[in-house]
Amino acid sequence: MSDSSEHTQGIVRPAPESFIKPDLVATISAHGIDDARRGLLKGAFASALVAMTGKAVAGESDPNIVNVPEWSKILGNAVATNPYGLPSKYEANIIRRQSPGLTQTDQASVAFTPLQSMFGMITPSGLHFERHHQGWVDIDPSRHRFMINGLVKTPMVFTMEELMRMPSVSRMHFLECGANTALEWGNSAVPTVQYTHGMLSGSEWTGVPLSLLLERAGIDLAKAKYILAEGADGSSMTRTINIENALDDCLVAYGQNGEMIRPEQGYPLRLVVPGVQGVSWVKWLRRIEVGDQPYAAKDEASHYVDLMPDGMQRQYTAIQEAKSVITSPSGGQKLMKQGYYCVTGLAWSGRGVVKKVEVSTDGGRNWREARIEGPALSKMITRFNFDWVWRGEEALLQSRVTDSTGYVQPQRTELIAVRGTRSIYHNNAIQTWRVNQSGEVENVQLG
Ligand code: MTE
C-alpha cells in the first residue's frame, strides 16, 4: 500500500524516514519553547527522531534505485494532457463529502471540506465547502447585473465588465458557516473533523471594496445604518449587514485563489464579509440596498438565531469568535506506531489575528504552546504545528486559541454554561480527540 492511499484512508504514520533530515532535531529545538523545557523536549524528540533517521543512515537500500520503477523508464504524458490540471489519481479520496442523512434534499444541503488532509492555510477551490439553500447555479456573466439602491444619491446597475474594470484588491480570509460544529452542541459527536469542522475554508478573494461602490453611488452616510445583500439564486438569500462592516473590509468579489470564483461559491459575484458568519457572504450577488434599520429577512428571523437557555432567541449574531481544531491526528485516523508526530491544526478569529495556540495531550490539564506557521493574517485561517512523541498511552488531544483581542477559546463546559445546549449556531468550543492505546482516534466530549 502506498503512502498516499494510507493517507487518504485516514491512517497517520510517523514521518517516513525520507522526510526526516538530520538537522530536524535542531530545527525543532529552535522553536520558541523556554530553555528548561527545551532541554527536556529536545531529549525526547532527539531520541524519537534519531530512531527514525537511524535506519536510513545504517544503509537500508532505496528499493526504487535497486528495482527501477516503470515511471523512470517511459516517455511521460504530453503537456496539456489535462488542459485544466487535476490532482493525482492517488488522491481520489480527498473530496468534499455530504454527511449521510443530514439534510432531506441534496439542494438545501452541505458538503464539507476534508480538513484532515489539508496543508497550510489555503483551501483549494475544488475542496471549498458548499452550503446552498436551493442548489447552486452557473450564471452567464454577460447577463448578470449588480444593483445598488436605497439610501444613495444615484442608484446604480453594474455589468461584470464594468465591475472588473474598477480598482480591485486581493485579501485572504476564512469563510465559516455559523452552523459549523452544530452537531457538537448535543451528545451526537460525529466521527471525523471533516464533519465536525469542515464548514470552514480559507481563500484569497479578489474584488472591488464595497466601500468604493457605495461611495460611487453616493451613500447617505447620515442615515445609512445597514445594508441588505441579495442573491440571484432560487433561495433569494437576503442578509442584513451593519454599515460599519459594510464600509470596513467587505468586498464585492469575483476572484478566488487567482481565478474566477467557482459556480458553487457564487460565480460570477459574491459578497465577502471578513470575520462574519458564512450566511452573510451572499453568493450570486445581485443587489445591495442601503437602509436605516435591520431588514428581519427570512434568513435572519427564524434561521441563524441562537436559542438561549432562558428561551429567548439571540438575533443578528454576526462575528465568528476565535476557534481552533487539531486536524491531524483527528477522529477516524489511526496512529500506526509509537514515536514522533507533528500534531497539526487550524486556528482563526473573526475579530482579528491568531496570537497564540496551545495544545494539551491530557484533556486540558497541561498546555504547551504550538508553533504558528505564518503568516498569521487577520480573519484568516492560521496553521499551527506541535511536536509530540506518542509512547502508546491514552491521550486526550485539545487545542486552544487566543486572538488579538485577548479572547481565549472556551472549553465546551464553559460555553454550555452560558449558551445551554439548544443552539445550532456559533459553537466555538475546544474540540477533544481521544487517542486510545491502539492508536485509534475518536471524537469525545469531556465533562
Ligand atoms: N448565498 C446565496 N445566494 N444562497 C445560499 O444558499 N448560502 C449561505 C452563503 N451565501 C447561500 C449564500 C451560507 S448558509 C453559507 S455558510 C455560505 O454561503 C457558504 O458558502 P460556500 O458554499 O461558498 O462555502
Image (spheres, grey):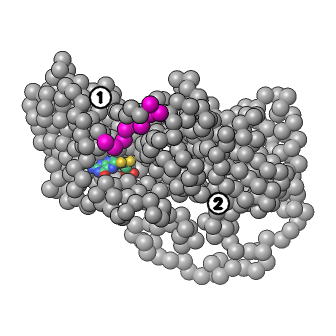
Secondary element at image label 2: loop
Residue at image coords 58%, 49%: 187
Residue 65: within the magenta? no
Secondary element at image label 1: strand
Residue 103 falls in image quadrant = bottom left
Up-down relation of residue 337 to residue 312 (above or below): below
Quarter of the image where the N terminus is located: bottom right
Query: At which x and y percent is residue 319?
Result: 42, 33
> How many marks are shown on the rendered structure?
2
Tell me the kind of residue under disc 2.
Gly
Between discs 1 and 2, the one toward the N terminus: 1
Q: Residues within 10 Å of mark 1 (few under 14, many from 20)?
A: some
Query: At which x and y percent is residue 285?
Result: 24, 46
Give the residue number, with chain letter if any, for mark 2.
332
Between 335 and 332, which is closer to the camera in this rendering? Answer: 332
Left or right: residue 70 versus residue 85 is right
